[in-house]
Structures are given as C-alpha cells and as structure tokens.
C-alpha cells in the first residue's frame, strides 16, 4: 500500500453509476488526488439487505456497475482494495438456495452454520447470553427447508445474511475462490469484513477467539500467496485492537474518530495524546467510513474486570449527546432503536455534521488524521464535506444510510467547488507529496489544551500545532504556514450554560 491518502467509495454513489464513470472521475477532476481506492462491495448484488455486504455471488461484479474488466482497468490506474465478506453470504445465494432445497443432501449443507453445529448438545442460558453480537437479541434465524423441516441458522447481523462455517471444506473453498478472483482482477489489497465473528465456539463470546486469530493467520497467508495485502476490520475494546495489530498486516484506527471529536468538543487533547502514545503504527486512519462513528472503540471493555476506556463513561455519554446536538438531532434519528440495521456501538452521522458543519473544525480534524502514523483513508462523503441524507434515511429506514448519499455528477462537481473541499484536497496533496511524511513522527502535548504533531525526514519537516481550546491550528511546511480556525458553528462540550447538564446525560 502506498503511503498516500486513499479513497473509500461505492462505485455508484460518487458522481456516477459505473466503474467506467468512476475511472473517468479519478482520471479527471480528481486526477492525482488519491494514492489508492477502496471499492466498497461491487459484487452481485449491490442493493441487498446491507448495501452489498450480503453478496448473492461474491465472484461476479454487479452488471449494473460493469464487469471484471472494469475492475482491471481501474486497478491499472490506481491500486484497488476490495472486501472479502468472510462471515456470511446472502440468503438468496445459489449455495443457500440449494441447501434449502436439498437439505443434508446439498453439497453446501455444512457450509451454513446452525445453532446445533455450535451447540450439538444444546445451549444453556448463560452460554447464549455470553454470545457477543453488535445487534440486540440472539444471532439466530429460523429457516424452513423445502421438505418442511426447520433449522436454526446462525445470523450475526440480519436474517438475510447467513453465517458460513469457515472451517468446512465448502466454506473454505468458497473464500479461497473469492481471493483468487480478486487477484486475477488486479486487486492488490483485501479487507476482511466482519472477520471477528467468523469463528463460533460453545461457551465463549464467539468474537475474536484464539481460534479466530488462527483463522486470520491462515487466511491472510492464503491472500499473501496471491500477492494480496490484508486489512482486518474489527470494532473492539482498544487494547484488543492493539493485540490484533501485532498479528496482521493492517488494522483500522477506529479510536481516532471519536477521540478527535472528544478533543474538539472538550477543548483538550489529553485522551487523544495518550492514545497516540500506544496506538499501532500499522494502521489505516479514518474519520468516516460506510459505517457509523465508533463508540465501543474508546469505551470500557464489556467483559468482566476493571478495564476502563480511553475516556470516562460520563464524557463518552456527553460526546454522543454533542454529536446529536451538532447534527441538530439527525444523528439521534439514525442511531440505536430509532433506526433498523441497528448498531449498538456506533453513532450514524457524517463527520462534517458531527462538527456542526464548521469548515475550520473539519479541516483541523482532517489535518490531525493525516498527521497520524499509518495510511489515511477518506470516505467519499467526507471528501465532499457531505451532510446527513435525511431523505435516504426516511426512504430506507436504515440508520447508516444517513451517511451513504448518492451523488450525481453535477452535485459532485458543485461540491468540489466548495472552499472547504478545495482546502481539503490541497491538504491531501500535501500529505501525498511532502517527503517528511516518510520520516520520523513526533507528538508533544503543550499545556492542557494544545498538541504539536510533526514529521521529520532529513532536512524536511512538517508540523501541525492545534489549540483545541481556541479550535485553531497552524500547519507549517517549507517555510509556509496554513491556518485553520473554527467558523464558530461547532457546539462544544467544554463550556456554556448546559455543560453540567450534558455531563449528567
């Protein structure tokens, strides 16, 4: 992976509807801006129960977008990352339909995980309650077979996403086939989606077990043998994320988005600075993705024991409430019990709205992201300083759709002319081109309210100095200084008449 800013996007939501249109965009208005692109699921079909994360056929490009030749053409222009949905597949997949029709006689019978497959002697109440799931309720769905019988299937996410047994020969062959197809198409990196849930074991949480790590090791080795780098996607307690990072090529720094918000809301970089001192360097840094803003990543561990989070519980609650205030309540309407496709550990909101649509605060947040060790990725909505799509949320009822807007070409070109977007792209170009970012990183706390981040490589130096109390920053490079300052639109959590009440929320 190049040490340059990457783009995360759906093929059909960023100024066009096809791979050819996306390629033209990256070769036109955005030429030279991104050092790679993570294509969110482009498999057949892209409009299932979970925006492509429930593929009917993971080895076929949705024909509405193009074909594998289109992926090859894009990969010849810019490095491409693709998802391998490890944990599950669509209830409409040919394999699952064959299983429903033929039961145990199907060649795919053992491919789909049942409750009995994990608990052959039945499960106790304690065993069922110990299962970790990012949704309310138990992860089981009743399926009716063609012969009239029923099976209790394991469905971690939704009833339309059927978990597979990654250790079964049919499951292993299925996943190997996906890797081989992606490699043939010129993809150079894969993201293992939902891999933390891929191994289930009776009497455990069924999440990030020692057996899960062993599976990741094996599967990553298969990927590397095909020339593919591997990114592991796991939302988890921060110490667990550090442990995961030691065993894989790349992990996301999911703690960074809420910690940047915390620093800007509370006017102090203390928790952010402490995280900088221990975070893994083999990180993909993000502020936004196709999912929500993670909360579990900086909170206390939910397992027994004294395992505090990166911020105290009261401040974490206040952070969530401040996101809701800055988004004028839109994020509240898209989060938790207010929306389907429920995530218990995320707040659904664009990052620009989480900062009250304050251009200066947004550019400060992006500058902090780009200065973190690792490789930055920017979500397509974030590239355009996008705002919450309440119409899409209302139409689908899916909380995360508030941050999954469909941009047509005219809307995209208008967004690119916004001063905040122009300045963001200038910042991306600086991050991509300045030689200091290939050198040594330094971080220094300045008093209670300021933070200095710097990169030094031989005679080259870039520095970002942020005063969180004043919400302003200075970026110094090559004798020039760029200043970013809050527009005054950001609602803070560090002062004002409602501060004490907010902390009690």
Image (cartoon, rainbow, N blue to C red):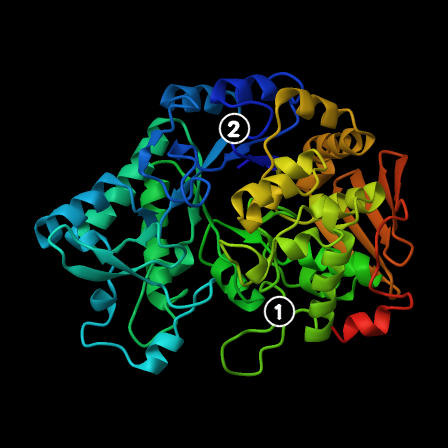
Tell me the quarter of the picture where residue 323 sits: bottom right
Considering depth in this image, is 400 or 199 the residue closer to the camera?
400
Is 399 situated above or below 184?
Answer: below
Is 163 situated above or below 107?
Answer: below
Question: Which label sits on residue 3?
Answer: none
Check disc 2: other Cα within 10 Å, few if <14, some if 14-19, many if 20+.
many
Q: Secondary structure at mark 1?
A: loop
Please name the residue shown 40% across and 40% down the image: 48
Residue 460 coordinates in the image, percent (x, y): 78, 37
Q: Secondary structure at mark 2?
A: loop
Considering depth in this image, is 175 or 213 the residue closer to the camera?
175
Say left or right for 184 vs 247: left
Query: Of marks 2 and 1, which one's residue comes earlier in the chain?
Result: 2
Q: Distance of mark 2 from mark 1, alpha carbons?
A: 34 Å
Check disc 1: other Cα within 10 Å, few if <14, some if 14-19, many if 20+.
many
Residue 23 visible in the current orientation: yes
Residue 388 coordinates in the image, percent (x, y): 68, 43
Considering depth in this image, is 425 or 337 the residue closer to the camera?
337
- Residue occupying the far left of the picture: 105
Please name the residue shown 78% across and 59% down the image: 263
In this rendering, which labeled residue sits more in front, label 2 or label 1?
2
Residue 444 visible in the current orientation: no
Question: Which label sits on residue 12?
Answer: 2
Question: Which label sits on residue 299?
Answer: 1
Tell me the quarter of the picture where residue 474 sits: top right
Give the quadrant of the C terminus.
bottom right
Tell me the quarter of the picture where residue 395 sits: top right
Say left or right for 455 vs 404: right
Say left or right for 407 vs 189: right
């Amino acid at each position: 992976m190049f040490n340059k800013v990457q783009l995360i996007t759906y093929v059909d939501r960023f100024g066009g509807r096809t791979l050819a249109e996306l390629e033209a965009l990256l070769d036109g208005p955005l030429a030279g801006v991104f050092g790679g692109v993570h294509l969110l699921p482009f498999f057949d079909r892209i409009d299932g129960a979970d925006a492509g994360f429930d593929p009917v056929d993971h080895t076929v490009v949705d024909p509405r977008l193009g074909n594998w030749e289109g992926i090859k053409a894009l990969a010849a222009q810019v490095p491409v990352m693709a998802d391998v949905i490890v944990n599950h597949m669509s209830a409409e997949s040919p394999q699952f339909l064959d299983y429903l029709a033929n039961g145990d006689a199907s060649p795919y019978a053992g491919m789909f995980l049942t409750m009995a497959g994990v608990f052959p002697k039945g499960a106790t109440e304690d065993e069922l309650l110990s299962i970790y799931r990012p949704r309310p309720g138990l992860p089981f769905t009743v399926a009716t077979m063609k012969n009239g019988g029923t099976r209790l299937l394991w469905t971690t996410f939704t009833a339309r996403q059927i978990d597979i047994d990654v250790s079964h020969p049919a499951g292993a062959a299925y996943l190997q086939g996906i890797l081989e197809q992606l490699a043939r198409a010129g993809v150079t990196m894969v993201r293992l989606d939902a891999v933390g849930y891929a191994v289930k074991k009776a009497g455990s949480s069924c999440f990030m077990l020692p057996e899960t790590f062993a599976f990741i090791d094996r599967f990553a080795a298969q990927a590397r043998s095909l020339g593919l780098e591997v990114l592991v996607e796991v939302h988890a307690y921060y110490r667990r994320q550090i442990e995961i990072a030691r065993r894989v090529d790349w992990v996301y720094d999911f703690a960074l988005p809420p910690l940047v918000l915390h620093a800007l809301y509370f006017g102090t970089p203390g928790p952010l600075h402490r995280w900088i001192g221990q975070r893994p360097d083999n990180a993909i840094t993000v502020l936004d993705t196709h999912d929500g803003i993670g909360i579990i990543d900086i909170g206390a561990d939910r397992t027994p024991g004294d395992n505090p989070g990166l911020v105290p519980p009261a401040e974490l609650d206040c952070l969530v409430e401040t996101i809701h205030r800055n988004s004028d309540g839109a994020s509240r309407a898209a989060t938790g019990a207010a929306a389907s496709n429920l995530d218990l550990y995320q707040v659904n909101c664009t990052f620009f709205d989480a900062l009250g649509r304050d251009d200066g605060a947004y550019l400060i947040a992006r500058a902090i992201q780009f200065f973190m060790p690792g490789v930055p990725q920017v979500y397509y909505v974030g590239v355009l300083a996008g705002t919450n799509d309440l119409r899409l949320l209302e139409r689908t009822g899916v909380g995360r759709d508030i941050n999954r807007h469909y941009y047509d070409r005219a809307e995209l070109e208008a967004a690119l002319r916004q001063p905040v977007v122009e300045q963001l792209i200038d910042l991306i170009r600086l991050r991509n081109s300045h030689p200091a970012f290939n050198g040594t990183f330094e971080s220094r706390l300045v008093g209670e309210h300021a933070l200095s981040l710097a990169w030094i490589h031989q005679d080259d130096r870039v520095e970002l100095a942020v005063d969180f109390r004043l919400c302003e920053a200075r970026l110094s490079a090559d004798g020039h200084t760029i200043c970013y300052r809050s527009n005054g639109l950001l609602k803070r959590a560090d002062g004002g008449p409602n501060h004490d009440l907010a902390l009690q929320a």
